[in-house]
Image (cartoon, helix red, strand yellow):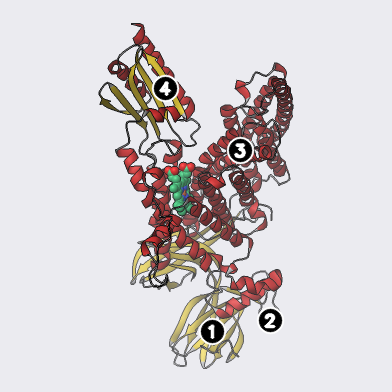
Amino acid sequence: MSQLSVPTSTTAKRRTVDPEPTEGTGGGLTIDVSEVGERLWRIFTSMRTALILMLGLAILGLIGTLLVQVPAGVQSDPQAYTAWLDTVRPKYGGWTTPMEMLQFFSIFSSIWFKGIIVLLTTSILACSVNRFRGLWKTAVRPRTRMTAVFFDRAPHSATIDVAVAADVAVTDVTRTFKSHHYRTVVERDGDEVSVYADRFRWAPFGTLMAHISLVLILVGALVGSTWGFKNTEFAVPVGSTVPVGNGTGLSVMAKSFNDSYYANGAPSDYVADLVLYKDGQQVAAQAVRVNEPLGYGDVTFYQAFFGAATDVSVKDASGATLYSQGVPLLYTADNGTRRVGQFLLPQQGLTVLVVSAASGEIDPAIKPGMVQLEVYKTGAGGGQPIDTQIVSQGKPIQMAGLTFTFDRERQFTGLMVAKDPGVIFVFGGALLLVVGLFLVFFFPSRRIWTRIVPGPSGSEVRVGATTRHDATFGPDFQKIVGEMELSLAGKSGN
Amino acid sequence: MLKMSEYSFIAAILSVALAIVFYAVAVVSVRVQRGRAAVAAGGAATFDGGTSVAVTSGSSTFGTYGTLVAWLSFAFLLASLTFRTIATGHGPFANMYEFSISFATGIIGVYLFFERRYHQRILGLIVLPIALLMLLYATTIPATADPLVPALQNNLLLTVHVAVAIVAYGTFSVSFAAAVLYLLQSYGVPRLPRAELLDEISYRAVVIGFPFMTLVIILGAVWANVAWGSYWSWDPKETASLVTWLIYGAYLHARVVRGWRGNRAAWLLVVGFGATLFTYFGNLFFGGLHSYSGLN
Ligand code: HEM
């Protein structure tokens, strides 16, 4: 095959490498930059590299599915991370520490993962650059004439003897190609005529599209993680307004929240009636459901979870209200029998925990209609509370010199707030990827060369083609040649 | 409607089983005859396949019956899925029962497509039992038609997601079958279809399956973005499908690398099918957002 002068990209841009090692000056301390570059280029453009990187990534993915992965947010908090590791220790035993050191529990942010992604991206870009010229040339300036050797050796070839001159034969040849939707290029050289025919000549760019789109998707992911944010624990108690933060100037008010269920107890719907404010002005209002998020600009609010909240108000000695808000009970404690929420009184330097019995739990201390309030010094690191009291709904109580009232129970709606400026690249890339793949695989590009030379009885038409593994080409080729024979035979009969 | 769906399902199981019997008889008798012919001719013991070789009527009749019954089972499966969709008001994606029937439908449909093109019933002898196992597995799952939990209430997107997935899974099953035959051949099992033909069938199957698998993952990402606000969260099922996709991507490149052609590429297909099954059954042993199996 290599003898065939087929203008595929590999032959068009094969780099010759000097087999002799370059002589180093100064005891081989200096490295020939161009040689190293050449070598790197060869490595990055090799299919073997692509193969190894893809399988390597697959192995990391497998590790990621088989091993428990540390939840987002836990890893950045050393204390929580140690505690989390202790929860998986029983499962993995002595392997836990080495696996932790190899970053197996956070495989998708590990050095291995990032390394492979960087290498793969580099390799994809190198391959695309490498292939572009060949693809362009094949599509725009294909080699239209082939020598006799080509037809002798082409995997698909046929010879038709006809009784007419080359000029006459060429019209039948081109007509046959045209009727099969091929484009033809005719070239004359003396009494010899070459007809080059191709179909879907732009389709091979699908490969290029597919590869570049992968890079685009990765760029989108990078943009999203650099300039976006994601708050998975944004809880808004019904009736309260909570600022979004992250420099958005937005705040969300939940007018209501409803969870409904089917007869068998499975959830059927979660709806939160939300109002969105920007710098105090209402800018949007919508019933947000699981599949119906609320979008404002590039920030999107998704219904994610829900739970119980308590309205608590705090007054100082003069009767001024320091705090009056719903407190979402976001956390569980004591093996899930209690639910806990917290809020801050920044001026007083106090942190207040609100504890209630989880729904359906009977708690000997905290009865229905009661919550336990715990007041701590902010930043004391979980030490002893200044004061702990169990309070009934509507009964003010004195703690740390302030008056606390548990006003009522509410629900909160848990939202996921996300801003992802990279999403457009990701889905743009995805679209490009699919289009590219369908182009490559469902529009196989075809190229057939024909050479008409004077022969013993008139002219000789030689047809030849090479293809990589394209199974449907063989029968098509036979069909085209058959039709050509038929129409040329009609000519010679005249 | 649910009853009709179940009857069609049972009819499909019976007809797949019957088709397998016919295929087995047809394949065995064809191979035996060809073996004799090959010995008589003193020639090679590998063959191009169905149409070009003259086979006496007895075995080819069995083959035709087998094909007919296989088509029948495909029709029953489609009917079962259609009835169920009408009854439940949503596509067959809500639990493992529905998805197993879909998977089997995809396997048989894609196989029949390849049989029309390549006439290799021996492939069916590997593919159809996989479909049968899928269906038998479905019988072990309660067929209750549960209403949809909120995240799954995205009918169109999910129906397309599943429809595309079963085509992908079907092609991967066919490529797996061809790869197994390829490997058997290379380890010396006589009278199988030509190695190049098997290689080509595997490749064509992946060529269809790979873009479809890509689409499956993308549609999943679109859905996740709409439902959860994040197109990718390394949920185990997502990750497993990415692993599957990467293995088939590697296979496409492997066929170009000289040292990887042949057996190693065939092994990749076997591993790829393993990954496909892992992705499919994954929700049984890992939790995550896709835990809709209906088995808890
Ligand atoms: C996840 C990563 C990748 C994916 C999904 C991917 C996908 C594909 C697909 C679908 C094809 C078409 C196969 C065929 O025609 O049979 C292809 C071909 C190719 N890929 Fe990749 N690829 C990836 C990475 C790479 C890398 C890293 C390289 C460079 C080392 C590379 C180089 C090539 C080349 C040279 C071709 C052949 C193009 C042709 O024959 O027209 N690919 N790739």
Residue B97: percent from left, percent from top: 66, 45
N-term-proximal mark, 4 vs 1: 1
Cβ–Cβ under 8 Å for marks 4 and 1: no
Mark drawn on residue A480: 4
Q: Nearer the viewer, residue A435 or B55?
A: B55
Dot 2 amino acid type? Ala
Dot 4 amino acid type? Ile
| Crowding at mark 2 (Cα within 10 Å: few <14, some 14-19, many 20+) | few
Mark drawn on residue A352: 1
Quadrant containing the C terminus of chain B is bottom right
Cβ–Cβ under 8 Å for marks 2 and 4: no
| Crowding at mark 4 (Cα within 10 Å: few <14, some 14-19, many 20+) | some
Distance in Å between CA atoms under marks 4 and 1 = 84 Å
Residue A132: percent from left, percent from top: 35, 47
| Crowding at mark 3 (Cα within 10 Å: few <14, some 14-19, many 20+) | many
Q: Is residue A463 above or below residue A415?
A: above
Q: Nearer the viewer, mark 2 or mark 1?
A: 1
The answer for which chain carries disc 2 is A
Distance in Å between CA atoms under marks 2 and 1 = 19 Å
Dot 1 amino acid type? Val
Do the dots labelled 2 and 1 sit on one chain? Answer: yes
Question: Could you say whether the residue bearing mark 2 is in a helix, strand or loop?
Answer: loop
As drawn, is A376 to the left or to the right of A173?
Answer: right
Mark drawn on residue A365: 2
Quadrant containing the N terminus of chain B is top right
The quarter of the displayed image where residue B28 is located: top right
Dot 3 amino acid type? Val
Do the dots labelled 2 and 3 sit on one chain? Answer: no
Q: Which residue has dot 3 on it? A: B174
